């Protein structure tokens, strides 16, 4: 039996040749940032955005945007309780405060009601996360943000290829951010992208990205970040981006493959795909219905004993020592605590085969005692 991996990319010889070209030729003059600039331009165009900035990862893309929006000490930013810590780390870097809001029981993203409840006079922005490629009710969330005059930020780290009512993920709010981590749909190893429409904000973020200087100048007017991308990473990113339909297609094949194989098990829930949404399916999450008596922690213990890898559904961030707000979190975000306690991630590696999906799905049946 070949090993089944939780996550990992698909890298072809042709992709490698782009990187080789950057290694061989990408050092002098215009060539030095050729792949960075090409990748940024094409990525922005694909998402119908005016501007893109490649960054070392998605965490830094979000941080850059928060500083660009002048969100700092004393400000509050609302974010979903269930997400990866990278969604919110930038808020802490800025010495601002993260206010956790609850998620929806079906799509596992923020709800407009939970955002509205969390708003205070100090709220400056909400970071909306498209968890597992799912998309929340953006129309209603946008209305809440407009009503209260707060920025909407889209963390699209997990939603490359997702579409909401005909609009690609990456177009929602003042800025959208992507991750090209090794585990993501397109990879640069580590890497990220910030998409923006507003020219002034773009220029400010570009300035903040490179030590507070204008491009080509050695005259620094502020001490800022060094969040510059590198041409070799961008060469791989651009090569992978050219394959976006194939790679998102494979992710969707994995999600749908699990859905078909597990369709006969009642009372389990995988990434939903209502008719107004296309799910980019970065990773498949499975939430056990209460009838099974199966929890995340029991599954994390039992699945490896069947010889398979597994990962937990995102923990509520408020429950983690990093934030230490368990009591408040349980009160304000009961759905996040409940869903997370019953959820796991299934493998999403881009090298998964039909046989892997068969074997893993049989493992889930065994776990739940169904045939
Ligand atoms: C929802 C979400 N936001 C942010 C990040 C951070 O991305 P990166 O690892 O590129 O910093 C991730 C990464 O896993 C993520 O899943």
Image (cartoon, rainbow, N blue to C red):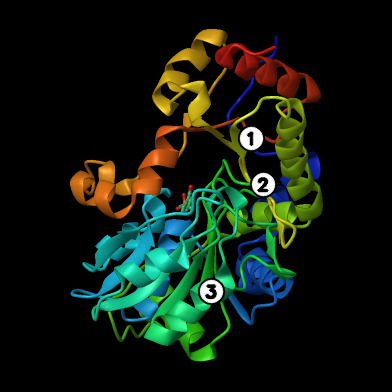
Q: Nearer the viewer, residue 33 or 114?
A: 114
In the rendered view, tell whether residue 221 sits above or below residue 123: below
**How far apart are labels 2 and 1 at the CA level?**
9 Å
Where, quadrant-wise, is the C terminus in this rendering?
A: top right
**How far apart are labels 2 and 3 at the CA level?**
23 Å
Q: Quadrant of residue 204?
A: bottom left
- What percent of the width, then of the height, locates residue 240? 72, 51
Q: Residue at x 52, y 62 (%)?
A: 229
Q: Residues within 10 Å of mark 3 (few under 14, many from 20)?
A: few
In the rendered view, tell whether residue 98 sits above or below residue 259: below
Q: Quadrant of residue 316?
A: top left
- What percent of the width, then of the height, locates residue 14? 80, 45
Q: Nearer the viewer, residue 301 or 220?
A: 301
- Identify the mark nearer the N-term, 2 or 3: 3
Q: Residues within 10 Å of mark 2 (few under 14, many from 20)?
A: many
**Number of on-image labels:** 3
Q: Which residue is denoted by mark 2 in the rendering?
A: 281
Q: Which residue is denoted by mark 1 in the rendering?
A: 348
Q: Nearer the viewer, residue 101 or 218?
A: 101
Residues at marks 2 and 1 touching, judged by CB atoms closer than 8 Å: yes
């Amino acid at each position: 039996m070949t090993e089944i991996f939780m996550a990992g990319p698909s890298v072809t010889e042709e992709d490698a040749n782009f990187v080789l070209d950057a290694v061989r030729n990408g050092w002098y003059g215009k060539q030095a940032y050729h792949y960075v600039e090409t990748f940024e331009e094409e990525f922005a165009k694909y998402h119908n955005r005016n501007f893109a900035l490649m960054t070392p990862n998605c965490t830094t893309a979000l941080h850059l945007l928060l500083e660009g929006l002048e969100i700092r000490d004393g400000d509050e930013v609302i974010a979903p309780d269930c997400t990866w810590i990278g969604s919110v780390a930038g808020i802490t870097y800025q010495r601002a405060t993260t206010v956790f809001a609850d998620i929806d029981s079906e799509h596992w993203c923020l709800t407009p009601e939970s955002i509205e409840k969390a708003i205070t006079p100090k709220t400056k922005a909400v970071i909306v996360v498209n968890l597992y490629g799912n998309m929340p009710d953006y129309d209603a969330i946008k209305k809440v943000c407009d009503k209260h005059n707060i920025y909407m930020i889209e963390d699209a780290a997990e939603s490359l290829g997702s579409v909401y009512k005909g609009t690609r993920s990456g177009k929602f709010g003042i800025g959208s951010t992507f991750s090209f981590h090794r585990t993501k749909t397109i990879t640069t190893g580590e890497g990220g992208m910030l998409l923006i429409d507003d020219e002034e904000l773009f220029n400010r973020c570009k300035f903040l990205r490179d030590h507070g200087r204008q491009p080509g100048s050695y005259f620094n007017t502020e001490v800022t970040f060094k969040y510059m991308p590198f041409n070799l990473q961008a060469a791989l990113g651009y090569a992978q981006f050219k394959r976006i339909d194939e790679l998102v297609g494979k992710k969707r094949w994995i999600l749908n493959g699990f859905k078909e194989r597990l369709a006969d098990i009642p009372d389990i829930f995988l990434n939903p795909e209502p008719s107004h949404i296309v799910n980019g399916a970065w990773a498949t999450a499975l939430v056990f219905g209460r009838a099974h008596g199966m929890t995340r922690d029991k599954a994390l213990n039992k699945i490896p004993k069947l010889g398979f890898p597994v990962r937990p559904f995102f923990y509520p961030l408020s429950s983690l020592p990093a934030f230490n707000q368990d009591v408040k979190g349980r009160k304000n975000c009961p759905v996040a605590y409940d869903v997370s306690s019953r959820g796991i991630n299934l493998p999403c590696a881009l090298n998964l085969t039909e046989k892997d999906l068969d074997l893993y799905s049989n493992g889930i049946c065994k776990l739940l005692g169904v045939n």
